Image (cartoon, helix red, strand yellow):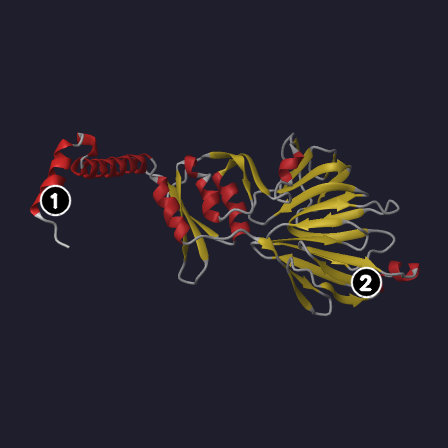
Amino acid sequence: MNKNESDIQEELNDEILAPFYKRSSFIYLAIACLALIATAVAAVFYKNHPDLDNISNIADHDLHAGGYKAILLLDKGEKFMLSDVGKGEITKENGIRILENTGGELRYQTENLAVDTISSPLAMAYHVIKTPRGGQYKIVLSDGTKVWLNAASSLRYPDKFNSTVREVELEGEAYFEVSEQDSIPFIVKSPLQKSLVTAGHFNISNYSDDPATTVTLLQGHLELSSVNKIQKASDDLTPEKVWLEPGDEGWITARGIKLVKVRPDESISWKNGYFQFSNADLKSVMREMSRWYDADVIYEGDIPDVKFNGEVRRDVSASAFLEMLAYLKVKFKIRKNDHGRNEILVRRQKNN
């Protein structure tokens, strides 16, 4: 229905007589001003936080955190893909049941075996468990020893131990909780070191791209030896062997062994679901990130000598991890290279 002239005039009179802040023209003007102010504030905030552009770009191509995954290789060539599903018994040989439990655990259960069978080297079969980049797993060995394997690591071990020595070989990083068994020594070998305990809790990290192998003792007593013949280079290095007490950490390089006091809980933060850094340089941080998010790190130009202190949950995405590093005045970019590999580009943040 069309409005008549008197109705239109009445609406105009109402608009003229209304207070200025209730008039429709003022309301429209106020909305426009607020929008302009919001845009200006956002522009100033963006200028003062240029790294936010980097973070938004990262979110377009994010990387998920690692999880429970590994590969079990038996001596006869059988291969099993492991996850956190829990399939129960996956195989049985030489009187050993191998179980895949929920929560990323592989467990060896020994059935009733004759003593001479256990002590016979010929009856032992060697297995290997490997975690990929972006994977971790727990294994309970036949003697009850518990081993947590970090990303990009492998452990070689017998399906059952003999009565004289328990020996395994490690590449990468693992946390051990060794159960005592009639004082039979437990030995962990890696390319630069040999750790010996009868019982105890300790962490060993020997990634090939790290500057040193580290052995950190949390509980018990540990004998740490260098596997190479080393000439003593300085007063703070031991060429052959040291004994660790709880809170000690041994650094092993080709030049010898250095013993330092540390907070041992920091060395196993990865096992407890955290990255924990104490005065860590940027490349150390990025090496850990690279293994967990399965991404190659590419450095562009001169990288500042910055240190990072803090704790980051291991279940966050890669972009969330990088956001926590924004204050280091370094910019990051997650991308795929021509071969489809994930890469994290690292470069110095430009000064404004």
Can you see residue 214?
A: yes
**Tag of residue 96:** 2
The tally of labels here is 2
Left or right: where does residue 335 sit relative to residue 181? left
- The x, y position of residue 245, in whole percent, is 74, 33
Q: Quadrant of residue 247?
A: top right
**Which residue is at 92% across, 58% downward?**
115
Cβ atoms under marks 1 and 2 closer than 8 Å:
no
Viewer-side label of 1, 2: 1
**Tag of residue 272:** none
Can you see residue 351?
A: no
- The x, y position of residue 59, in whole percent, is 41, 50
**SS label for mark 2:** strand
**Which residue is at 15% across, 55% downward?**
1
**SS label for mark 1:** helix
Left or right: where does residue 224 sit relative to residue 18? right
Quadrant of image for the C terminus: top left
**Which residue is at 82% across, 56% downward?**
161
Pick whichever, 225 or 262, lies toward us. Answer: 262
Name the residue type under label 1: Asp
Category of crowding for the residue at label 2, using alpha-carbon neighbours closer than 10 angstroms: few (below 14), some (14–19), many (at least 20): some
Name the residue type under label 2: Ile
User: Which residue is disc 1 drawn over?
Assistant: 7
Of callouts 1 and 2, which one flags the residue occurring earlier in the amino acid sequence? 1
Left or right: where does residue 130 sit relative to residue 25? right
Category of crowding for the residue at label 1, using alpha-carbon neighbours closer than 10 angstroms: few (below 14), some (14–19), many (at least 20): few
- The x, y position of residue 347, in whole percent, is 38, 43
Per the model, the C-alpha gap separating discs 1 and 2 is 95 Å
